[in-house]
Image (cartoon, grey):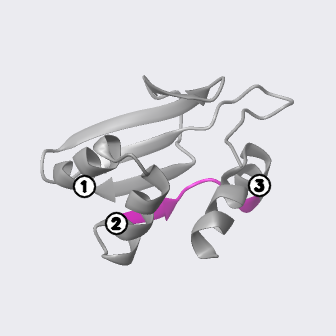
Amino acid sequence: AELRSLILTGEPPQIQVKLPDSDEVYTITTVDGSVRLIKPTGEPDLILHMTQETLARLTESENTHEAVQDALDQGKMNIETVADEKTLLLKGYLGIADQFNS
């Protein structure tokens, strides 16, 4: 499963990453399957809350899926849903969520 823009509007997937230990906020999206840091253009679909240390572990990990699952299991990352379920489904988030729930 991968994230994609909405077909009718072209609105890209946007995930905001909040780092409460540094007051930094990033917005990421995917372009042609690559993760990109962008300027926010409206409300994000999801907000990920984690520390700088957790973000570093995720970005340095050779197995991102496993690192994300570990961060979720250990309570080191929380996911806040902003978009409605239909938008999440159309942008591919629910397919990704299923991978973590199985």
Instruction: Return the residue nearer the eye: 51 or 62.
Output: 62
Does residue 35 appear to the left or right of 19 in the view shown?
A: right
Q: Which mark is residue 71?
A: 2
Chain-order first, disc 2 or disc 3: 2
Above or below — where is 30 with respect to 58? above
Q: Secondary structure at mark 2?
A: helix
Name which of mark 2 and mark 1 comes first in the sequence.
1
In the image, which residues are magenta? 78-85
In the rendered structure, are the residues bearing label 1 and label 3 in contact, judged by CB atoms less than 8 Å apart? no
Pointer 3: what residue?
89
Tag 2: amino acid: Ala
Residue 72: name its quadrant: bottom left
On whether residue 80 falls in the magenta region, the answer is yes
Q: Amino acid at mark 3?
A: Leu
Q: Nearer the viewer, mark 2 or mark 3?
A: 2
Q: Amino acid at mark 1?
A: Thr
- SS for dot 1: helix
Residue holding disc 1? 54
- The residue nearer to you, when weighing 69 against 26, is 69
**Residue occupying image coordinates x 65% and y 31%:** 12
